[in-house]
Structure formats: structure tokens, C-alpha cells
Image: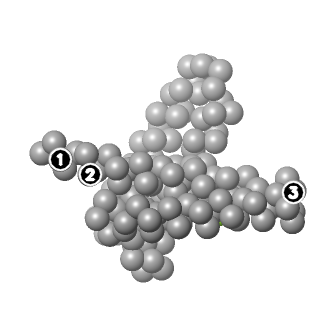
Amino acid sequence: MGEFWEELNEGSAEIDRQVGQMEDAGDGLTATISALVSVKDERVRQEMLRESGKFEATCADPTAMTDAERFAVLGEEFGEVAREVVEHGPEGSLRAELVQVAAVAVAWIEAIDATAEQGRL
Ligand SMILES: [Mg+2]
């Protein structure tokens, strides 16, 4: 297994471990945590697809995409939510499409944070 996959698996496992601790603490946020874990899993899937060559970059890459390109990706995902609402309703893939919208937004936030971090170095 390559370094990328090891780091991805370790990061994902660490998040799952911390989520488990939060759930054990019974903080009343189980539904929120469940949604956020789905978003994390989608971010992992996006990075796996990038690594496998399906696309050159994700919205998390601070240099490979412009904000206009990220906006296009987010808009496409938003459009897929709209299609689910209009054509399929809650019985279709609405939840999965909403998770994808959130994951693209998170990736974009990661790029902003990485750029800010580079500015502080
Ligand atoms: Mg989608």
C-alpha cells in the first residue's frame, strides 16, 4: 500500500475513532455526527478517485483549480440535488447528492485553509 493510501486510511480511521468517542459521550449530536461521517467518507472517496486518476485534482487542492472551477463543481453537485428533488424526491439519491454538495464545500474550505496556512509560513 502506498503512502497516500496509508495516510488516507489512518486519517479516516482517526476521525472514526474520535466520532466513536463523541457517540460514547452521548452528547446528543448523533444525527449530526452521522451526517458528518458521511461527508468525511465522501471526501475520502473523492481523494481516492483523484489518486486513481479519474480526475487530476479535487477542490481541496490549493493550486490546481481556480475558485471559478470549484464553483462549477459545486454548481454541478447542486444541480444534481435539484434533479433529485424534481425527478425522484426523497426516495432517490437525495441524501447522497446532499452529502456530495457538503463534501465539495468542505474540500473548497480545505483549499482556503491550506492557502492561508502557506501564507503564514
Ligand atoms: Mg452529485
- Please determine whether, in this image, residue 19 is positioned above or below residue 51: above
Please report whichever mark, 3 or 1, sits nearer to the chain's N-terminal start: 3
Q: Residue at x 60, y 35 (%)?
A: 33
Amino acid type of the residue tagged 2 in the rendering: Thr
Q: Where, quadrant-wise, is the C terminus in this rendering? A: top left
Is residue 18 visible to us here?
Answer: yes
Residue at the far front: name it. 68
Residue at the far bottom: name it. 53
Amino acid type of the residue tagged 1 in the rendering: Gly
Question: What residue does disc 1 label?
Answer: 119
x, y (%) of residue 70?
46, 63
Amino acid type of the residue tagged 3 in the rendering: Gly
Q: Residue at x 82, y 57 (%)?
A: 85
Question: What residue does disc 2 label?
Answer: 115
Q: Label 3, label 1: how many angstroms apart (C-alpha)?
A: 44 Å
Q: Is residue 43 left or right of residue 4?
A: right
